[in-house]
Amino acid sequence: MNIGDKAPDFLGKDENGKDIHLSDYKGQKVVIYFYPKDSTPGCTTEACNLRDNYSELSKQGYAVIGVSIDDEASHRKFIEKNDLPFTLIADTDKRLVQEFGVWGEKQMYGRSYMGTLRTTFIVDEEGIICKIITPKEIKVKEHAAQILG
């Protein structure tokens, strides 16, 4: 997905197994942020930064949706543990990470493996991607400011 592309309407199932569509957020800007794994240090820091700035994001017209390949039970635990006020998509079949082009090769401790590349897409009120914050740009401790900036 690139800036100017129409984002897909069907996003997937949330932490409760409910189908989530972009059209459910008509008239709002939507932050779709992809992250590697529930309850890991960087992902928790990023989610908590979005939580702590959620009222400002909402005030400025943004809805927030997190996406990882973790399952619904993992997402429910992550939400409860960190008091997250937004939806998390359980992309267990990797459909959405592949559709958005954020499933790719990563490196850690000298080994290569496939995983989710931490990326944020901002979708305007018409469902068009208007901004992408790439893995190299994302600062997990300041992510809300990056979105609002």
Image: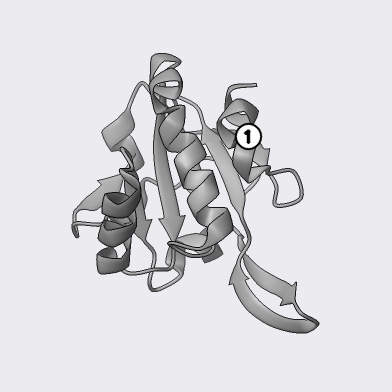
Q: State the image coordinates of residue 96 (x, y, percent, origin top left).
A: 46, 60
Q: Can residue 35 be seen?
A: no
Graded by Cα atoms within 10 Å as few (under 14), some (14 to 19) or many (20 or more), the crowding at tag 1 reads some
Of 57 and 6, the residue lying toward us? 57
The single residue placed furthest to the bottom in the displayed view is 111
Residue 109, placed above or below residue 138: below
For residue 146, side relative to residue 108 (left or right): left
Of 83 and 60, the residue lying toward us? 83
Report the residue at 45% width, 15% height from top: 60
Q: State the image coordinates of residue 135 (x, y, percent, origin top left).
A: 70, 52
For residue 104, side relative to residue 76 (left or right): right
Q: State the image coordinates of residue 65 (x, y, percent, origin top left).
A: 40, 43
The single residue placed furthest to the top in the displayed view is 59
Q: State the image coordinates of residue 9 (x, y, percent, origin top left).
A: 37, 45
Residue 112, placed above or below residue 103: below
Q: Find numbered disc 1 in the image and state the secondary structure of the residue it sits on.
A: helix
For residue 9, side relative to residue 129 (left or right): left
- The residue that disc 1 covers is 142
Quarter where residue 105 is shown: bottom right
Report the residue at 44% width, 19% height from top: 56
Of 99 and 58, the residue lying toward us? 58
Q: Can residue 92 be seen?
A: yes
- Tell me which amino acid carries mark 1: Glu
Report the residue at 19% width, 54% height from top: 18
The structure's colour scheme is one colour
Give the total number of marks visible in the rendering: 1
Q: Quadrant of the C terminus?
A: top right
